[in-house]
């Protein structure tokens, strides 16, 4: 495993502690690695109008993009549940806009992770 992946995993686990999930209790953390080796983190943010909830993955991407980053290599995603959760379809499409070859690291715990290529999780992304 790439040495930066261990840092991403730790950053993702730390980021989920900031999650705001008063309705579901489902806390998610994400850590995004740029081509320039910077890490941007995000957490999910629930609000009472649940359809406007922000996913951790998109928060991390938005932070990075707002700082001028547009090239990414990997994202680590962790939750407070004892199982692997895959990103939602909206997050997959969002990530694919910037890097269809992104490595997606899904974390159950520090010893149980799965790594995918984004193009395998979203083989047919939407294109205009």
Image (tube, rainbow, N blue to C red):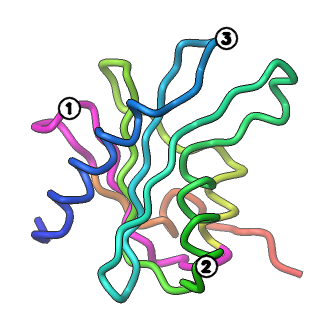
Location of mark 3 (residue): 23
Q: Earlier in the sequence, mark 1 or mark 2?
A: 2
- Examine the image and state in which quarter residue 49 appears: top right
Neighbours of disc 1 within 10 Å: few (<14), some (14-19), many (20+): some
Q: Is residue 104 magenta?
A: yes
Label total for image: 3
As measured in the structure, the alpha-carbon distance from the residue carrying label 3 to the one carrying label 2 is 31 Å
Location of mark 2 (residue): 98
Neighbours of disc 3 within 10 Å: few (<14), some (14-19), many (20+): few
Residue at screen point 43% across, 41% down:
29
Residue 119 horizontal/vertical position (percent): 52, 69
Residue 108 horizontal/vertical position (percent): 27, 31
Q: Is residue 41 above or below residue 54?
A: below
As measured in the structure, the alpha-carbon distance from the residue carrying label 1 to the one carrying label 2 is 27 Å
As measured in the structure, the alpha-carbon distance from the residue carrying label 3 to the one carrying label 1 is 24 Å
Residue at screen point 50% across, 86% down:
71
Q: Is residue 49 above or below residue 9?
A: above
Location of mark 1 (residue): 109
Residue 100 horizontal/vertical position (percent): 54, 76
Q: Is residue 4 magenta?
A: no
Numbered disc 3: secondary structure? loop
Find the magenta span and give its range.
Answer: 97-114
Numbered disc 1: secondary structure? strand
Numbered disc 2: secondary structure? loop
Q: Nearer the viewer, mark 3 or mark 2?
A: 3
Q: Is residue 38 above or below residue 79?
A: below
Q: In this image, 104 relative to 109: left or right?
A: right
């Amino acid at each position: 495993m790439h040495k930066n992946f261990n840092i991403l995993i730790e950053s993702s686990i730390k980021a989920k502690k900031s999650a705001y999930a008063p309705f579901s209790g489902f806390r998610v953390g994400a850590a995004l690695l740029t081509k320039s080796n910077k890490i941007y983190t995000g957490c999910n943010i629930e609000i009472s109008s649940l359809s406007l909830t922000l996913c951790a993955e998109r928060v991390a991407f938005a932070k990075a993009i707002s700082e001028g980053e547009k090239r990414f290599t990997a994202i680590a995603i962790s939750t407070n549940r004892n199982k692997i959760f895959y990103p939602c379809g909206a997050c997959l499409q969002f990530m694919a806009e910037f890097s269809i070859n992104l490595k997606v690291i899904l974390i159950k715990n520090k010893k149980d992770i799965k790594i995918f290529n984004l193009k395998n999780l979203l083989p047919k992304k939407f294109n205009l």
